Image: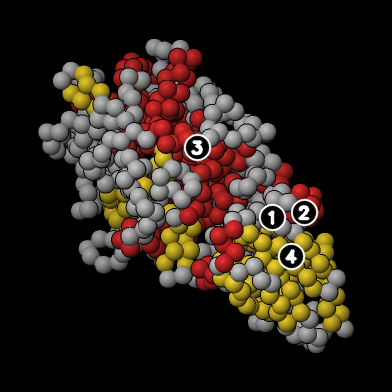
Amino acid sequence: MHVPQILGAFLVGAALLLTSVAVSHAAGEKMPFPQGVTYAHGIKPTNFSQSQMNTDVQNMWQSWRKAYLISEGAGGNLRVTTGGTGGTTLSEGTGYGLLISVYMANSGNTGKNDFDAIYRYYKSKVIIRSGVNYGLMAWRVQSDGSIRTKDNYSAPDGDLDAAFALLLADKQWGSNGPINYRHEAIDLINNLMKYTVHNRHPTSPSNLIARGDMSQKGGPEDAETYTMTSYQMTCYFTQFADATNDAKWDAVMAGCYNMYNYFYNLNPSTGLTPFTCLTMTYGVSSKGSSYSFDACRVPWRVGLDYLWHGTVNSTLAHDLPNRMTKWAQTVTGGNPQMIRSNYLLNGTASDGYIGSQRSMISPMAVGAMVDSSNQSWLNTIYAWMRQQVPGTNYSSGGQTSRGHYYEDTVMMVNAIIVTGNMPNIDAGSSSSSSSSSSSSSSSSSSSSSSSSSSSSSSSSSSSSSSSSSSSSSSSSSSSSSSSSSSSSSSSGASYCTPYGNSNYMYIQSVKMGAINKNSGANNGYANFTNLSTDLVKGSTPTIKLTPGFSVDAYDTSWKAWIVWIDYNGDGDFTDAGEKVAVDWTTGNSSVAMSFKVPTTAKTGKIRMRVAMSFDNDYDNYLSPCGTLIFGEYEDYTVNITN
């Protein structure tokens, strides 16, 4: 969501350059900037060479980065500011920052370092309400890092961009480093499905993206009755469906195009969509009925679907942005500098303000790319775009386009698209073998309503454990080999793959009987089912668990521990008595927990799952298929004997 505001223009590049130093990454990008591709469908500007357009985008990115990417108030990371060190950070801007960084990255710049630092900031600002971690970023964060109660909800456009950027990061760098991009992407996509897709109507769900469960209820309209048209980002849903094997994203795609079709037919001369629409009937919402700051992104989101996929998803992928951009050409007289900031859906200007050109007109360039009849208009827009400098005003013909956060950042993303530097990805597979094994995670069907789990369905036969290399070299090889095995147990049962975050704290060691594993950090989850110990029915064994820390500050915090054993071997840990031990510790002390093995347990080899979580995650980690903000899961085998 974007709220128009007058922002102070402060340049903070010097501080950023001191704190954001490029890091080396031996693997390098698989798709380094510049790509300069010819998209599968559509056109590109023809009035400048590809080399010149690449230079234009590089220069624009350097100016954007200097003006809006800062370390102040980011807790050792980076954030996209709405204006100087005192500016807030929005989830929308964070998503944009991730997109920009992953597409601009190459071995000679700070793109990867920027991406990781922005994502760490994103993860540190997720919504937690009543103990539930939604896994989505709070809409607005203050400059000091605090989140006001009224801002602690999801405006899902930023999360959608972040999820796609993570899929691309996996393709760029693989997922064997400190951040398992693919795991993070699948978690986020599943959380989006769980919390932001309006699919709760018993007979006719609209499947539109909305604020969903995070809404403040009450009033004539809330997220149960209205949503924003610019949230319906059809360019991504094919990749989300492929990455998660979740066909419900196809229903989201259809729902979005149903809504767009409503306004395409309602406004035959413009195709314009309103700021908000009714969730179930698509009619114009009283919360915002004009085409302005937010809805201006629609020709970009839909047009990009056409550039990548043609009309496979809908003929509207071509027809809607084509109609919108032709209207823009007419209403401005072919002069991008003359676009206004607010229009009625019939195309009539609703105020006398000429402005916000960078965000209002740049998406129209993507809209123009869908049809060769727009070549001249596309060339005109691009010639205008390349003269804009983020953070700096531009005057021409008596009108000024202002350099502000929102306008500049929307323009930056669209400049990457227009110049052929935003190629599509095949989200169905990972660039690395270990993260590939995690790509089979299906959509969440967890029975735990309090968990923010984006767990795979326990019936998924393709779920695999996925562990990145350990932070300690001694445990790296064993972790990698064990975690690349199938998540099916020796009895043939198939298990969900949980996700954690070992960047701060993790399970250092597990000791019980013949199991004595000193594993270190394993990127949130590790499969050590090649290690086993015997448990006698009716006995009372003791398991000793020790925490480890990647960040020393967390060694004084409370940790919650939990152990599950699948005593009946049915592929889950949800049956009565299968949560065998729970405890809390503080500091770096170990915990020893005893439990009694039931005499009714299935004889033979079955699975044990151990979890350690930061205590604020308690409600979340109760699910054995959960997603932890901080903490780790590990799996082992126990052999039940008589």
Is there a contact, CB below 8 Å, between mark 4 and mark 1?
A: no
User: How packed is label 1: few (under 14 Cα within 10 Å), some, or many (20 or more)?
Assistant: many
Nearer-the-camera pick, 638 or 629: 629
* Viewer-nearest of discs 1 and 3: 3
Real-space Cα distance between discs 1 and 3?
Answer: 26 Å
Mark 1, residue position: 522
Q: Secondary structure at mark 4?
A: strand
Which numbered dot is residue 475?
2
Residue 95: x, y in percent? 44, 43
Mark 4, residue position: 509
Task: Specify which label sits upstream in the sequence, 4 or 1.
Answer: 4
User: How packed is label 3: few (under 14 Cα within 10 Å), some, or many (20 or more)?
Assistant: some
Task: Specify which label sits upstream in the sequence, 1 or 3.
Answer: 3
Name which residue lies at 55% across and 60% down.
553
Real-space Cα distance between discs 2 and 3?
Answer: 30 Å
Q: Secondary structure at mark 1?
A: loop
- Left or right of 307, for residue 374: left
Asked whether residue 281 is in view, the answer is no
Amino acid bearing label 2: Ser
Is there a contact, CB below 8 Å, between mark 1 and mark 2?
A: yes
